[in-house]
Amino acid sequence: AALPATLRGSNMLAVDLADFGAFTLAVQNRYIFQTCLSRCKLRFAHSRVYLQMTADNWSRTSDTDNDMTVLAYSMREVLQRQKIFQDMLSPATSVDQQRSTDEAYEDLVSVTWA
């Protein structure tokens, strides 16, 4: 969504998080919660920004942790730790290596929900 002209150049924006708060109370799966921002939308109205959870988020609130979500979450942690160790061993880690780690995680997540 494009930023309306009335909000351009402003140093501070009011963001309404009411829908996000309601979603936080309803969601039962930590993976769904951690990835919900990738499935939300920003709506601009007057001088406010609204963070709206989409139907894709709301339809997953009652999903409980299952083996695949636990596996995806665990693999994410392993990939993050691997990146930390790579960075410690080689301070000049290339952007290509980081991109491949991120892509591997995204591939795992897409397989989880496919």
Image (cartoon, helix red, strand yellow):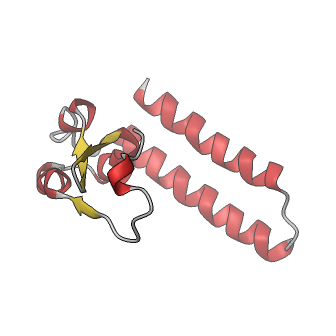
**Residue at the image position 22 percent from the left and 43 percent from the top:** 64
Furthest-front residue in this view: 6
Q: Position of residue 66 (x, y in %)?
A: 31, 41
**Residue at the image position 88 percent from the left and 69 percent from the top:** 92
Q: Position of residue 1 (x, y in %)?
A: 39, 38
Horizontally, residue 96 falls left or right of residue 73, namely right
Quadrant location of the C terminus in the rendered image: top left
Horizontally, residue 44 falls left or right of residue 100, namely left
**Residue at the image position 74 percent from the left and 45 percent from the top:** 100
Horizontally, residue 49 falls left or right of residue 84, namely left
Most foreground residue, 29 or 3: 3
Residue 31 visible, this angle: no
**Residue at the image position 11 percent from the left and 53 percent from the top:** 22
Vertical comparison of 38 with 8: above or below: above
Q: Position of residue 98 (x, y in %)?
A: 74, 54
Residue 81 visible, this angle: yes
Horizontally, residue 53 falls left or right of residue 81, namely left
Vertical comparison of 112 with 24: above or below: above
Most foreground residue, 103 or 82: 103
Furthest-top residue in this view: 114
Q: Image quarter for residue 85?
A: bottom right
Vertical comparison of 45 with 9: above or below: above
User: Total of numbered circles in the picture?
Assistant: 0
